[in-house]
Amino acid sequence: MTVAGVVTLVVRYGLVMLFLPFSALDKVLNFQGAVTQAQEVFKPRAIATIVLICGLSIEIFASLGVVTGVADRFCALLIAGYCAATAVLYKRFWAPGDFWARGDSKARNLFWDFLKNLSLGAGFLLLVIGTTGAGLKPFLAHPFESSHPYALAGHHP
């Protein structure tokens, strides 16, 4: 693998390492606790369990897609949506009502986590649209195709 390929691998893994292995492993090792946390938003335990399994699947399979380059743009879009959804559902900085309070504020702490989720999602969207200036056109034409992140410049298998 070339130096550019290694750098690409490291950057892509840097984007997903929050999810794979850390968040995914946490969900697996503390499944009941994760279901309880999901119940904060999805009250019925069965629904919370289904949502958690969907999230776990995204964390594992979409992360692997981003790192390996298999349907990587589609996988990056899934993770970007996941980041936005978890920001809105679990980082509800508007709920505590203490955003403008002096001193420690739960709302401000949640606000920074909210912005981190959205920023990470934006990083994944950059994988979806690329950096060539072509925008969404290549993705929309072939959403499940690999972007060939490890191919030599100008050479796609």
Image (spheres, rainbow, N blue to C red):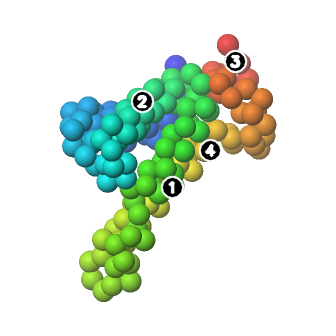
Helix, strand or loop status at disc 3: loop
Question: What's the distance in space between the residues labelled 3 and 2, CA to CA?
Answer: 29 Å
Q: Given contact means CB atoms under 8 Å apart, are the residues at marks 3 and 2 in contact?
A: no
For the point 26% across and 32% down, the residue is: 28
Identify the amino acid type marked 1: Leu
Q: Given contact means CB atoms under 8 Å apart, are the residues at marks 4 and 2 in contact?
A: no
For the point 45% across and 26% down, the residue is: 61
Looking at the image, the residue that sits furthest to the top is 157
Residue highlighted by disc 1: 118
Which disc is residue 126 wearing?
4
Residue highlighted by disc 3: 156
Identify the amino acid type marked 2: Ser
The quadrant in which residue 106 appears is bottom left
For the point 25% across and 46% down, the residue is: 36
Q: Nearer the viewer, mark 3 or mark 2?
A: 2
Is tag 2's residue or tag 1's residue first in the polypeptide sequence? 2
Residue highlighted by disc 2: 57
Q: Nearer the viewer, mark 2 or mark 1?
A: 2
Is tag 4's residue or tag 2's residue first in the polypeptide sequence? 2
Q: Nearer the viewer, mark 3 or mark 4?
A: 4
Is tag 4's residue or tag 1's residue first in the polypeptide sequence? 1
Left or right, 126 with reference to 7: right
Question: What's the distance in space between the residues labelled 3 and 1, CA to CA?
Answer: 32 Å
